[in-house]
Amino acid sequence: MWSLKSWQGRFVAHPLPAGERLRAYAGWCTAVEGNTTFYATPARDTVVSWAEQTEPGFRFVLKLPKVVTHERRLADVDDPLRIFLDAIEPLGPRAHALWIQLPGSFTPADVPVLDRFLRRLPTAHRYAVEVRHPEFFTDERATAGLERVLADAGAEWVPFDTTAFFRHPPTSDAERDAWTKKPRMPRRSRALTDRPIVRYLGRDATAETVEGWQHWVEVTAGWLREGRSPTVFVHTPDNADAPLLARRFHAEVRARVPRLEALPVPAPIGPLTLF
């Protein structure tokens, strides 16, 4: 996600051609969630444009298409998976991880299916799995079983931390919408690989968002000290200030780990124009 309408004129210049917005976003943040790939596999030419707009060290965490994860539930997916992997090939090292987000109906009983799927994936990519069934977080045997399968495949477990968001009832339209759609799960902070990935959802109020991420500031700093290379995505219900918040989170981590590389300096944003 790098072309939110509310960012235009604030974080990216306005007007700005669609083919230049990722380049502008990459001046603010060095990683992006590829959520659109869940709904449709991009054309290879489009992916070539993504590569041209970003440095080799930029991180794409790309979600596998829903036909693979939700419709066919990881079975009989050779063709759509091959098409997807061919499409993203131009990203090269920018494809930091392929994100396997599984539906809430994917239970611990389905883990053998995930195991078979992971074993068949090409080793050229890294993989990260997000599960949403509560038993994975509350049942020790289910947790251990999933961790074992992921560890065997060298795959990461992606936590989606919504605990701060669900701390008290919503107070805006954006929060009310997210309240009905986002999963409620216990927070998980255990990394399985040297590339942990965290998704964090805050609130409309910046102070509440910042208070809620203090846990992740300490965890992320600890991972860095251990030699890991974490990627953290900061969300709010409307994501209107997400790039600014992400940079603030990075600054808080860097205050604890000064050797952490600084983020790029964003390009100046001119005033809004009529034409």
Image (tube, rainbow, N blue to C red):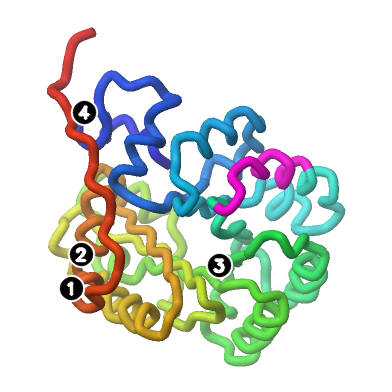
Residue type at mark 3 is Arg
Q: Residue at x 71, y 60 (%)?
A: 124
For marks 1 and 4 on the same chain, the one whose residue lies earlier in the sequence: 4
Image height check: is 250 above or below 6?
below
Q: What is the crowding at mark 2: few (fewer than 14 residues within 10 Å), some, or many (at least 20)?
A: some
* Closer to viewer: mark 3 or mark 2: 2
Residue labelled with disc 3: 132
Q: Quadrant of the C terminus?
A: top left
Q: Position of residue 233 (x, y in %)?
A: 38, 59
**SS type, badge 3:** loop
* Closer to viewer: mark 4 or mark 3: 4
- Magenta stretch: dominant secondary structure: helix
Q: Quadrant of the N terminus?
A: top left
* Closer to viewer: mark 2 or mark 4: 2
Q: What is the crowding at mark 4: few (fewer than 14 residues within 10 Å), some, or many (at least 20)?
A: some
Q: Nearer the viewer, residue 22 or 209?
A: 22
Asked if disc 1 and disc 2 are in contact, CB closer than 8 Å, the reply is yes
* Closer to viewer: mark 3 or mark 1: 1
In the picture provided, is 133 more to the left or to the right than 261? right
Residue labelled with disc 4: 9
**SS type, badge 2:** helix
**Alpha carbon separation for disc pair 4 and 3:** 36 Å
Residue labelled with disc 2: 251
Q: Nearer the viewer, residue 35 or 246?
A: 246
Q: Which residue is most to the bottom? A: 140
**Alpha carbon separation for disc pair 2 and 4:** 23 Å
**SS type, badge 1:** helix
For marks 3 and 1 on the same chain, the one whose residue lies earlier in the sequence: 3
Residue 222: which quarter of the image?
A: bottom left
